[in-house]
Image: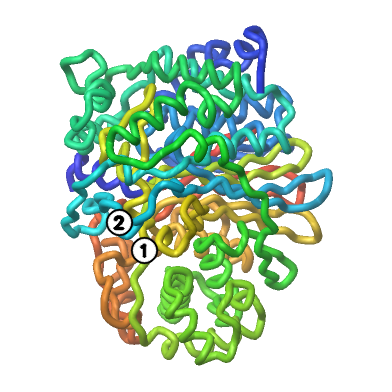
């Protein structure tokens, strides 16, 4: 497959401080050799080889950007906590990815182990609806044709596709509760690269022509697309954003309130309403991060925790891990056809239950269990569902909606662990052309119409992304933060392998991914094809899988990259070392302190 097609496919995966203290955290203080090395790694897109990283002090693992990972590690070296490192990494991810698939106007979900209290906390910084939106069923569609392969009419009032963002409030809340360094220091890498310019890599260079139609719809979008006013950004350029620099400096001075009550908020509301939206300053000022009790699944001597029960992805992940624990596939799914079948059917069931209330009611009737998420985490549900997978999958249900995200796992010297996922839940830079002070505005409301219909005006949209932390004997042992269309599949296959010791971390990362089938959205769930990456299994193995009653279809590298999930992985080993891993063709990087 051509390199350009591979690059196109990757779109589917993917406090205050003095000037002196801020400068101390800036990449300007990194060696020129380090900056060059990191920028070369970024341009290569993937790690070049399998590698492990470990340290007794700290670790950062994150998707998409080795520059962002290094920014997080430098925060750990400066005495920052896992929360500090996660904030710095996430800000830098957005800047180095040019806000294409993650956004300062996006959302975030967090699970955090606090070494002082020995507790795990869950944070929901998801989308709020606009209180003035009274007809969510008529919100225009968001264009996901590149993912689904189906044409979409995305016309209509672009401003109605927007929602109240939670990312900036979430970063501020996480830092206020668990941070140690001044918040402004954590923005320094983002400011540095927004001012000096982000090197345009083959990946981001491929994004611009893909999104040119959308960005060309508004003057601000055209300015973003062609910073010099005449030429589209290309490979080898350095993309600088003076507007973003000024915004980030105001956030340094005023904190996250800049995006909820400040100048940016005013400009955001004006832009949304000019495009037919229903935004108000009151909706932004009223936004609050929610701290919730995490869901807790007990497997053997391990407890796996995810965000609270309104988080559909977290519930699906834990449901699948529960059923797999009772279904008992002892061998890795990529080595044994029966294990492949059990894993595939379990993932289908967990995904359907997470996205279909009708399916949940049907399962409740068949198994005699409760239909809510906590009921699916009991041993009784796991054992019963494991024995009736084929029966439970006889009905119809649509799969989940995909989105773009980035993820971070940070572990510090004190044993605090942050597992963070943040997202724009939107196509590249959205499909509206709206850009406010260098920040492309996501368009998630078109994806979440069904959820918005069921909510009161201005309500919190249930999240469909979930990081996980596993605890053994009261201490964290590993954490994953998953992104991508097949995020549930990716989190479950890796976490199940870690819990049951089926393979080492690097092998798990490099194993063939499990893929969510977006191509067959109607008909019985059991009858859908299991999509597998071409060339990763022998034909003899696939024949054995088919003999178990599973229909299997190979898809090329382009489609695999469009559909797969990717995760950030952090481990605390028995010797107390913080460890991570990298694998070729997996968009995840790890660096130890």
- Residue 553 placement, left or right of 121: left
Q: Specify whether residue 117 is in view.
A: yes
Q: Position of residue 156 (x, y in %)?
A: 21, 46
Instruction: Note whether 501 is above or below 56 in the view shown.
Output: below
Report which residue position mark 2 lands on.
Answer: 560
Q: Residues within 10 Å of mark 1 (few under 14, many from 20)?
A: many
- As helix, strand or loop, the secondary structure at mark 1 comes to loop
Residue placed at 26% from the left, 34% from the top?
433
Circle 2 SS class: helix
Indicate the position of residue 399 as horizontal and vertical percent values.
36, 68
Q: Is residue 339 visible?
A: no
Q: Quadrant of residue 352?
A: bottom left
**Residue wearing tag 1:** 515
Q: Left of 359 or right of it: where is 520?
A: left
- The answer to the question of whether label 1 and label 2 lie on touching residues, with beta carbons closer than 8 A, is yes
Above or below residue 516? Residue 49 is above
């Amino acid at each position: 497959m051509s390199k350009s097609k591979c690059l196109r496919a990757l779109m589917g995966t993917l406090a205050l401080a003095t000037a002196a203290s801020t400068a101390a955290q800036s990449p300007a203080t990194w060696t020129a050799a380090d900056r060059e090395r990191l920028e070369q790694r970024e341009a290569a897109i993937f790690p070049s080889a399998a590698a492990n990283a470990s340290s007794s002090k700290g670790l950062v693992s994150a998707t998409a950007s080795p520059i962002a990972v290094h920014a997080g590690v430098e925060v750990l070296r400066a005495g920052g906590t896992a929360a500090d490192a996660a904030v710095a990494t996430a800000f830098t991810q957005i800047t180095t990815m040019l806000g294409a698939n993650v956004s300062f106007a996006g959302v975030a979900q967090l699970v955090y182990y606090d070494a002082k209290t020995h507790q795990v906390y869950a944070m929901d910084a998801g989308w709020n609806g606009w209180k003035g939106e009274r007809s969510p069923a008529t919100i225009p569609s968001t264009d996901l044709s590149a993912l689904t392969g189906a044409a979409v009419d995305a016309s209509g009032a672009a401003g109605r596709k927007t929602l109240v963002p939670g990312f900036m409030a979430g970063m501020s809340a996480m830092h206020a509760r668990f941070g140690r360094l001044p918040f402004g220091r954590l923005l320094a890498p983002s400011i540095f690269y927004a001012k000096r310019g982000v090197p345009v890599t083959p990946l981001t260079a491929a994004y611009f022509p893909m999104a040119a139609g959308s960005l060309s719809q508004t003057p601000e979008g055209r300015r973003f697309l062609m910073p010099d006013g005449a030429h589209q950004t290309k490979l080898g350029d350095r993309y600088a954003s003076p507007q973003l620099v000024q915004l980030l400096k105001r956030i340094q001075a005023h904190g996250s309130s800049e995006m909820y009550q400040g100048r940016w908020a005013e400009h955001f509301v004006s832009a949304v309403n000019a495009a037919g939206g229903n935004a108000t300053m009151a909706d932004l000022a009223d936004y609050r991060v929610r701290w919730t009790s995490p869901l807790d699944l007990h497997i053997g001597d391990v407890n796996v925790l995810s965000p609270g029960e309104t988080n559909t992805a977290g519930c699906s992940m834990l449901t699948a891990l529960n059923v797999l624990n009772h279904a008992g596939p002892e061998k890795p799914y990529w080595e044994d056809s029966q294990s492949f079948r059990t894993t595939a059917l379990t993932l289908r069931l967990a995904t359907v239950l997470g996205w279909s209330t009708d399916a949940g009611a049907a399962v409740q009737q068949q198994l005699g269990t409760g239909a809510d998420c906590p009921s699916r985490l009991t041993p009784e549900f796991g054992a019963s569902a494991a024995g009736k997978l084929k029966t439970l999958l006889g009905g119809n249900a649509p799969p989940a909606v995909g989105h773009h995200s980035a993820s971070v796992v940070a572990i510090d010297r004190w044993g605090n662990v942050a597992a963070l996922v943040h997202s724009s839940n939107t196509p590249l830079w959205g499909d509206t052309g709206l850009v406010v002070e260098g920040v492309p505005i996501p368009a998630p409301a078109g994806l979440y119409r069904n959820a918005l219909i069921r909510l009161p005006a201005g309500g919190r949209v249930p999240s469909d992304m979930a990081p996980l932390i596993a605890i053994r004997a009261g201490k964290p042992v590993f954490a994953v933060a998953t992104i991508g269309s097949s995020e549930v599949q990716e989190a479950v296959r890796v976490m199940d392998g870690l819990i049951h010791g089926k393979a080492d971390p690097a092998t798990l990362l490099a194993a063939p991914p499990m893929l969510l089938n977006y191509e067959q959205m109607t008909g019985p769930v059991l009858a859908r094809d299991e999509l597998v990456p071409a060339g990763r299994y022998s034909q003899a193995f696939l024949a054995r899988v088919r003999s178990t009653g599973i229909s299997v279809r190979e898809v090329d590298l382009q489609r695999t990259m469009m559909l797969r999930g990717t995760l950030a992985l952090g481990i605390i080993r028995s010797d107390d070392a913080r460890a991570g891993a990298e694998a070729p063709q997996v968009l995840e990087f790890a660096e130890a302190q």
